[in-house]
Amino acid sequence: MRTVAVGLAERAYPIHIGSGLLADPPGIEAFRKRRLKIVTDANVAPHYLAPLLRALALRPEDALVLPAGEAQKTLASAERVLDWLLAARLPRDGCLVALGGGVVGDLVGFAAAIYQRGVDFIQVPTTLLAQVDSSVGGKTGVNHPRGKNMIGAFHQPRLVVADLDTLRTLPPRELLAGLAEVVKYGMLGDAQLFAWLEKTLDWLLALDANALAKAVEQCCTMKARIVALDERESGPRALLNLGHTFGHAIETHTGYTQWLHGEAVAVGLCMAADLSARLGWIAAEAADRCLGLLGRAGLPTQLPPGMTPARFMELMGLDKKVQGGRLRLVLLKAVGQAVVTSDFDAVKLQETLEHFCAASSSR
Amino acid sequence: MRTVAVGLAERAYPIHIGSGLLADPPGIEAFRKRRLKIVTDANVAPHYLAPLLRALALRPEDALVLPAGEAQKTLASAERVLDWLLAARLPRDGCLVALGGGVVGDLVGFAAAIYQRGVDFIQVPTTLLAQVDSSVGGKTGVNHPRGKNMIGAFHQPRLVVADLDTLRTLPPRELLAGLAEVVKYGMLGDAQLFAWLEKTLDWLLALDANALAKAVEQCCTMKARIVALDERESGPRALLNLGHTFGHAIETHTGYTQWLHGEAVAVGLCMAADLSARLGWIAAEAADRCLGLLGRAGLPTQLPPGMTPARFMELMGLDKKVQGGRLRLVLLKAVGQAVVTSDFDAVKLQETLEHFCAASSSR
């Protein structure tokens, strides 16, 4: 087992990464005397709910199983969780357990943030995306028809338990979506990780335990470092949004039903690399390396049909990255070095949008 | 003008108290370059919205007017505010202004807490209750059919502007409801304030400007001190809940439609004093002083009809003050000295409930 510490003073917590952790979650002892409630979804429950209930000595009525999918990440679903907690009279010193992928983690974390003005919660991520990214760092929230994650809170988990074995039941498409976030970490801050991914991609796709463990640990380590520097995203944390402003526009456009978050991020990463190259900040070859790796992984590198540059700009206008009326983007100065900036040539952004929209409509 | 500072390091903020502040709110300069949105209610808007829009150089479409009343303090109302903010594309560096009483302040503060994971907000309290209590300290939230303030967040305002002139248009019943909270401060932590209230009650009821200014300043000073010690209510802040566990049960029982929050708190204060006397912690005469002052102010000191001890216990069971399965109450060791404790004789609690329920049903 590998452990990464998130250093946030009184909000510090460990991320435990390894195999076979669900049967006896490390770090759970401190929570055994508290009232615990598990929330999961219909995809995850058949595989992992019974073992986790057993490990925590809970009964089936201590778990709520929600429908699965990004379209469920709504205020209405959060309200359903809150209603259930209130009916069960979970006290303020109770603790929620989020068992599932990014949707469950974001939703349950948000419910924990606003139930009785905040109760503790534990993340048990079961997708690669959640293990490398969304379960760590305390960003919680739900989507709104007008935009992704528009309603939410910063609320750190008390513990993260990432059991790599859960990735074995993950649909291949979900695994790839998680890989997009892994590639993101390489692109934004670790050229060595990026090069390692280029070499190791096939091992990861084959679910090699060592390769997965290293990828999850590297990503969590980088995320923990950035979150400790800037918990509430007033500075460097925004680097983690590489590809996400473009990606969120795609998700909002497609109504959260057709594309997985990681798939939208993959195209967003391609667009960020493309724009960085058009601005002359990275070589065309560097952008090609990014598109190449994502494409080799089987991730989408082109937009869904029907998006126009004008629609794209409109959707990005509401993104949280807008500040003082200017759109801020995360762009590349090199593979392995991103910057957050609103200081770029808008003409080049238009060219990138036109290029990707044209490629998509000509398919 | 009097100013009280809430000392919360990077979340510190001033409370400005005085007359004529709405026309040129002190401390607003720093916010003039930000996009501002006002939320108020239908009772307050006719009196104070136009002057505040003018003072902030805003247009009518920059304000949302909600229906008035505690029954509106729901997740659905918060969602309405969020929908409006998203339609208006308020950016993350925008700022909300809550113009109104406790309901507006709690609701708008909560919306600010969860809009794009948290935006700044300013409290402009227009009721005595909001000026002495709810606008200060960052407790935000909405009610749930199963309990008061069950959904919420800790989110500090950036500025509080309490214009005492707004109390002149306050319905007398609302003024009295605020006085209940003022009496609470005296009972829980300041015997001198309590004695001053006994002497000065008639001046306060006559809206004497000096008396009001002193009352608001004293309460804000005490609240600021307690909040600075214990922002998230892990310790002494719970003292501020004196009378509230009983009061919340009354509000939940009556569906938030018949009783004002302060009226329910007034009865709750009587019950806390009564129980403290039954436990032998204060003299019967001390409890009588509390009931006497609240009664002289014209506040209710008896329960609404139809409450039974069993129903009362059930409603209190879900209160946030339950910890480790035990009900914690704020009780008196003296007039001017409260304690938070679960270490009391449950038989005496039963006696208090029976006494108040019997008195009410025999009316």
Image (spheres, coloured by chain):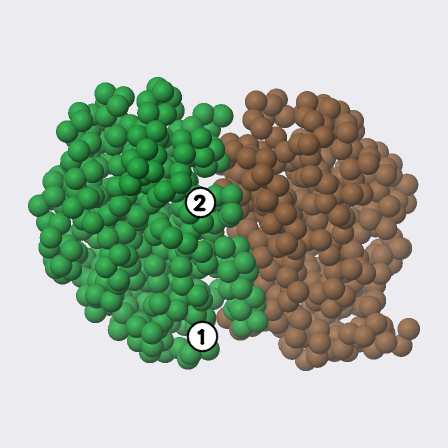
Chain colours: A green, B brown
N-term-proximal mark, 1 vs 2:
1
Q: Which secondary structure, mark 1? A: helix
- Label 1 crowding class (10 Å Cα cut-off): few <14, some 14-19, many 20+? some
Of B324 and A18, the residue lying toward us: A18
**On screen, A329 above or below A70?**
above
Label 1 lies in what chain? A
**On screen, B340 above or below B361?**
above
The numbered mark at residue A252 is 2
Q: Which residue is rendered at x = 78% and y = 40% of the image?
A: B44
Q: Locate the C terminus of chain B by quadrant.
A: bottom right
Picture coordinates of residue A265 (x, y %)?
Answer: 31, 43
Residue type at mark 2 is Thr
Picture coordinates of residue B341 (x, y %)?
Answer: 59, 66
Q: Which residue is rendered at x = 76% and y = 52% of the image?
A: B69
Q: Which residue is rendered at x = 46% and y = 28% of the image?
A: A323
Picture coordinates of residue A309 (x, y %)?
Answer: 40, 31
Reading the image, the residue beneath label 1 is A62
